[in-house]
Image: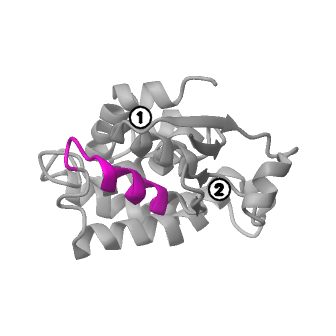
C-alpha cells in the first residue's frame, strides 16, 4: 500500500493529495502531528516535513510536486499534465514556491517580522504572483486554458492561504479573476474530498 504522510491544512500536502486522488491511486493517508512526528516518518525522511510518500515499491518521494508528477504519470484522466509544461506556467510555479511563499509567510505571521507592516508583505506577495495570475486568468478560466492543468492545482492551495489571511479585504480586492478561479477550486469535489478529516 502507498502511504502518504500529510498534514491536512499544509498547502504542499493538499496539492499532493489532490493529484493522488485525481489519479485514482490507492493510498493510506497518515495525518501527522507536527509537534509529535511519528518515528516512521523520521526514518523515511530526515527532513521530516510533509508531505512524504512511501510508495508500495519502497520508493520514498519527499517533494510535493514530485508526488503530483508521480501520481499523474500513472493516470491523468483530465490531462492535468497537458499544457502545463511551458515557460509561463513554469515561471508561475517557480514564483509561487519561491518568492510568493516567502512573502505569504510574512503576511500570515507578520508579528514575527516586525521590520515592516503587514500590508507591506501583502503588497510584495501581490506584486510577485497575484498580478501575474490576474493577467493570465483574465483571458482563460484556468492556467491550462479552458481546462485545469498541473500548475492550477499546484498553486491553488497557496492562494487559498493568501485569501484567508484577510478574507474581507480579499473579497473586495481588485483581483476578480483570481477570486473566481479560487472559488472554483474551493467548490471542486476533489478539494472537498481531500480536505475531509482523516
Residue 185 placement (x, y as % from top left): 35, 35
Characterize the magenta stretch by its predominant secondary structure.
helix
Viewer-side residue, 102 vs 42: 42
Determine the residue positioned at 76% across, 52% down: 41
Q: Are marks 2 and 1 in contact (CB under 8 Å)?
A: no
Determine the residue positioned at 20% across, 42% down: 78
The correct choice, above or below, for 24 with respect to 111 in the image is: above
Q: Quadrant of residue 114?
A: bottom right
Q: Secondary structure at mark 2?
A: helix
The span from disc 2 to disc 1 (Cα, nearest Å) is 18 Å
Q: Which mark is residue 118?
A: 2
Residue 173 placement (x, y as % from top left): 39, 43
Left or right: 15 as drawn, with respect to 151: right
The stretch in magenta equals 65-79
Which residue bears the numbered disc 1?
Answer: 171
Residue 85 placement (x, y as % from top left): 24, 68
Amino acid at each position: 500500500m502507498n502511504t502518504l504522510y500529510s498534514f491536512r491544512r499544509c498547502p504542499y500536502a493538499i496539492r499532493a493529495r489532490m493529484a493522488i486522488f485525481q489519479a485514482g491511486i490507492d493510498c493510506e493517508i497518515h495525518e501527522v502531528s507536527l509537534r509529535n512526528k511519528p518515528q516512521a516518518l523520521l526514518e523515511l525522511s530526515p527532513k521530516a516535513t510533509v508531505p512524504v510518500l512511501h510508495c508500495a515499491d519502497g520508493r520514498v518521494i519527499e517533494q510535493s510536486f514530485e508526488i503530483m508528477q508521480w501520481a499523474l504519470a500513472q493516470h491523468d484522466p483530465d490531462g492535468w499534465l497537458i499544457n502545463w509544461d511551458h515557460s509561463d506556467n513554469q515561471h508561475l510555479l517557480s514564483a509561487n514556491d519561491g518568492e510568493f511563499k516567502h512573502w505569504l509567510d510574512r503576511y500570515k505571521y507578520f508579528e514575527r517580522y516586525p521590520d515592516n507592516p503587514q500590508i507591506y508583505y501583502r503588497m510584495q506577495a501581490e506584486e510577485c504572483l497575484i498580478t501575474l495570475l490576474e493577467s493570465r486568468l483574465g483571458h482563460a478560466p484556468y492556467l491550462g486554458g479552458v481546462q485545469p492543468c498541473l500548475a492550477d492545482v499546484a498553486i491553488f492551495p497557496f492562494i487559498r492561504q493568501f485569501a484567508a489571511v484577510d478574507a474581507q479585504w480579499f473579497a473586495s480586492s481588485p483581483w476578480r479573476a483570481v477570486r473566481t478561479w479560487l472559488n472554483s477550486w474551493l467548490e471542486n469535489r476533489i478539494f472537498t474530498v481531500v480536505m475531509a478529516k482523516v
